[in-house]
Image: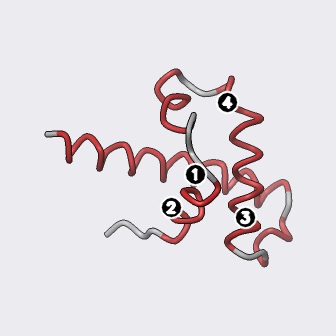
Amino acid sequence: MIEKTEGNAALHKRKLIDKFLIKLTKEEPQMYYATTSEIARSLYSMLKEHTNRLTIEEQALIRHMTMEEIQGLLGFHPK
């Protein structure tokens, strides 16, 4: 049961990252050509900036998220 919950959390984090990635590329189209680490840095800043606009559950998911974790999620492709 715990593994399923952790998997759901990872999937939900990925969905949040995707949501903010869409917002980021709309606001800054040149980010399309940026490196994964640059995108992760920008997303990290955005998440910190917009945390208070997220649900309590979403806030809990991203509260301790690092730039490295974001970078890993950007490279993760669910099947």
Separation of marks 2 and 1 at Cα, in angstroms: 8 Å
Residue 12 picture quarter: top left
Residue where numbered disc 2 is placed: 73
Question: Given the image, on which type of amino acid does mark 4 rest?
Answer: Thr
Q: Are discs 2 and 1 less than 8 Å apart at CB?
A: yes
Query: Badge 3 is on which residue?
Result: 39
**As drawn, 18 above or below 16:** below
Mark 3 touches mark 4? (CB < 8 Å): no
Residue 4, image quadrant? top left
Label 3 amino acid? Ile
Task: Please give left or right for residue 23 compared with residue 13 in the image.
Answer: right
Q: Give the alpha-carbon distance from disc 2 to disc 3, as whole Å.
A: 11 Å
In-image side of 23 versus 5 (left or right)? right
Verify CB contact (< 8 Å) between mark 1 and mark 4. no
Q: Residue at x 78, y 75 (%)?
A: 34
**Going from the N terminus, do you reach mark 3 or mark 1 first?**
1
Q: Name which of mark 2 and mark 3 comes first in the sequence.
A: 3
How far separated are the C-alphas under marks 3 and 1?
A: 11 Å
Dot 4: few (<14), some (14–19), or many (≥20) neighbours within 10 Å? some
Amino acid type at mark 2: Leu
Q: Which residue is mark 1?
A: 17
Query: Which x, y percent locates residue 52?
Result: 68, 23
- Judge the density around disc 1: few (<14), some (14-19), many (≥20) Cα neighbours within 10 Å: many
